[in-house]
Every structure is written in structure tokens, then in C-alpha cells.
Image (spheres, helix red, strand yellow):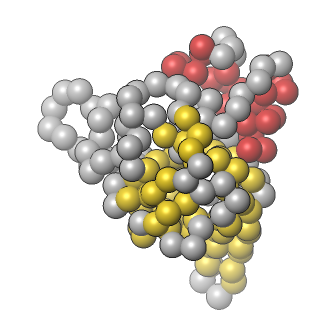
Amino acid sequence: MQSQSRAGIVLAVCLRSDSGVPKYPQARARIGQDGVEGDFHAGPVNKHKKTGPPELNHRQLTVMAAEALDSASRRLGVTLGAGAIGENLLVEGLGDLADLRPGDVLRVGAEASVRVTGQNTPCATLSVYHKDIVKALTGIRGVTAVVVTPGAVQPGDAVTFARHKS
């Protein structure tokens, strides 16, 4: 069995109680059973689905790489700080996260872990920063995830990723 692993740190933990951007950096937050406590996207049901039967929330939280945020900022000539893109966790040291796949698990801090559900598609809401931001972030917008293990998280915490291959 082969193992691929990487380690980095949490630069920011962000939340916002309503929809939209930016999310606001916190000194500390709790990743609860259904996402970052107090954040709009937390919960067992997808809040963006307005019609039809409710569906399970596959994006309880989002993780964004600082490397990707910095790259988009430079290319567009804008300043995008922590929370600007609507991410809950801004991490550094894991690369741009474009290679993470559904099912991959990130361990965050001493307690929490989250399972990747997919790549996060940039939405038109982000156009408040620049008309070309959706294009600049396509493929590097980070990942959506659901909670595996709740726990406290704060800037400076370790974040690790390991993928085992048979």
C-alpha cells in the first residue's frame, strides 16, 4: 500500500451567518457536526436548494488554499484576503487543492476532520471583486467538505492530508 501525504497550517477560520461574501475571520471556531458553527452553510440540509424536496448538505464547509488565493489576486491585480472567496478554512502548504478528490480526508487541528465532497465551483457572487474572477478561480476554488469528526480550530493549527492507494 502506498501513501501520499502533505501537511500545512490553517491561516484563517471564517464564517458568516448569512449568504454572501466575505466571510469573517475568527480567532477560534468550532467545526460542529454539520459545519462551522454559526456559518450560513452549516447544517444537514443544502440551503441553496429552493425548490423540490430537501437534499443533504454536501458543502457544510469549504477549504481554500492560500496559494490559489494569492495566485488569483496577483493575476487580477486585486487584494483578496481571508474569507473573501467565502471559504471557511484558508490553509497553506497543501498546494492549490486541485488534486483532492471526493472521499479524501483532511485532519484539522487536534480534533477535527472533514471529508472532501468535491471541487468548489466559483460562482457569480465573487464578481464583486473583479469581472474575471470566476475564470481565474476555475479549477482552484478549493473544495467542499462534510464533517467527519467535530472539533475546535484556530489559525496556526496543523492541517494534514493523506491519501492511501492500494
Q: Looking at the image, is 40 positioned above or below residue 29?
A: above
Q: Is residue 102 visible?
A: no
State left or right for residue 130 relative to residue 38: right
Say which of 78 and 131 sits in front: 78
Residue farthest toward the front in the current orientation of the protein: 27
Q: Is residue 147 visible?
A: yes
Q: x%, y% of residue 37?
A: 39, 50
**What residue is shown at x 56% (from left), y 44% (from top)?**
26
State left or right for residue 157 relative to residue 42: right
Q: x%, y% of residue 61?
A: 46, 48
Which quadrant would residue 7 be assigned to in this image?
A: bottom right
**What residue is shown at x 65% (from left), y 88% (from top)?**
1
Say which of 83 and 71 sits in front: 83
State left or right for residue 67 relative to residue 84: right
The quarter of the rendered structure image containing the C terminus is bottom right
Which quadrant would residue 32 be assigned to in this image?
A: bottom left
Marker count (numbered): 0
Q: x%, y% of residue 16?
A: 45, 34
**What residue is shown at x 50% (from left), y 53% (from top)?**
29
Say which of 21 and 2 sits in front: 21
Say which of 52 and 156 sits in front: 156
**What residue is shown at x 15% (from left), y 38% (from top)?**
53
Q: x%, y% of residue 119?
A: 55, 46
